[in-house]
Amino acid sequence: MSTAGIHLDDIHKTYGSGPGAVHALDGFTLHIDEGEFVAVLGPSGCGKSTALRIGAGLEQADAGEASIGGTTPAELGATGGLAVAFQDNALLPWLSVRKNVELPFSLVGRSVDRDHVDDLLRLVGLDGFANHRPAQLSGGMRQRVSIARSLVLSPHVLLLDEPFGALDAVTRHRLNVELARILDAQRSTTLLVTHSVEEALFLADRVIVMSGRPGRVKREVAVPFGRHRTKAVMADPAFLALAAELTEALDDAEVAGGTAA
Ligand SMILES: Nc1ncnc2c1ncn2[C@@H]1O[C@H](COP(=O)(O)OP(=O)(O)OP(=O)(O)O)[C@@H](O)[C@H]1O
């Protein structure tokens, strides 16, 4: 087994009980190799975030096993080896941009690496905003702070739950390019939950399509482009063909599983 690969094995998860119980995952299995980037697509409510939260140790599976290189996600998270970024960027409003990005150092009891924080702020285009508070930033800028914070400890494992979902298309694409560049330098094992087929294909080494709830892996596509992708790849006939294939698989999953969350 790889040292920092993500292993979700035969995961079952039901919320609640009785007639109102929601069967979110039923035998969900996903293995991500060390350094690999996997994007997960699926109908709304199919259990994507549930799978990610179980992989992050934020939620317990009813049955099945979540492990990362032989340890539990919670143990890895406690040492800073695992980081999560959500769409709701959850910055602390009373702290500056810099202090928000530095926060994970104190959470794991490490001294702040100011040079690394400076590098990250530069990489996400926020070096002129280090002393601003979140309320003084646009939504896209706050999202970049959140991304920088998730990367600051150079985590082995990065879990991204729709981190760009609330952004306009132009900002979203720019952040996709920035993230790809950062992950080129810092090879975190990455799981991205997204609703965007193009985002999945632009960023990932492999794309998974889940079925409607209870979610299982329904389709899997290896992305045949190297890292160092530029916008031009999105016009490549192979990219367009894969985007069409994944969109169809997603439509089929919605029809088969219904969309009620
Ligand atoms: N804490 C919870 N309590 C009860 N039900 C929950 C909870 N979290 C998720 N669910 C339910 O489990 C199902 C799967 O939710 P989940 O958030 O994993 O789906 P998703 O695929 O990420 O959806 P979306 O794409 O809309 O974000 C949904 O029906 C949701 O309502």
Image: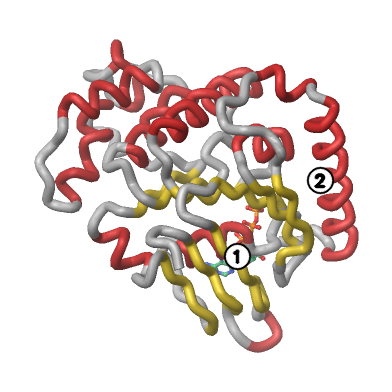
Q: Residue furthest top?
A: 128
Q: Quadrant holding ligand 1? A: bottom right
- Residue 79 appears at what percent x and percent y? 23, 57
At 70% from the left and 67% from the top, the residue drawn is: 215
Left of 183 or right of it: where is 251? right
Q: Secondary structure at mark 2?
A: helix
Q: Above or below — where is 221 with respect to 97? A: below
Quarter the N terminus occupies: bottom left
Residue nearer the viewer, 199 or 33: 33
- Residue 8 appears at what percent x and percent y? 54, 69
Residue nearer the viewer, 183 or 56: 183
Q: Amino acid at mark 2?
A: Leu
Q: Secondary structure at mark 1?
A: strand
At 73% from the left and 68% from the top, the residue drawn is: 213
Left of 241 or right of it: where is 8? left
CA gap, disc 1 to disc 2? 18 Å
Q: Above or below — where is 196 with respect to 67? A: above
Badge 1 density bin: few <14, some 14–19, many ≥20, Cα 10 Å: some
At 64% from the left and 63% from the top, the residue drawn is: 47
- Residue 161 appears at what percent x and percent y? 53, 48
Label 2 beta carbon less than 8 Å to ligand 1: no
Q: Above or below — where is 145 with respect to 174? A: below
User: Which residue is the site of mark 1?
Assistant: 30
Residue nearer the viewer, 76 or 69: 69
User: Between disc 1 and disc 2, whose residue precedes?
Assistant: 1
Q: Quadrant of residue 146?
A: top left
Whether residue 20 is visible here, answered yes or no, is yes
User: Which residue is the site of mark 2?
Assistant: 246
Whether residue 22 is visible here, answered yes or no, is no
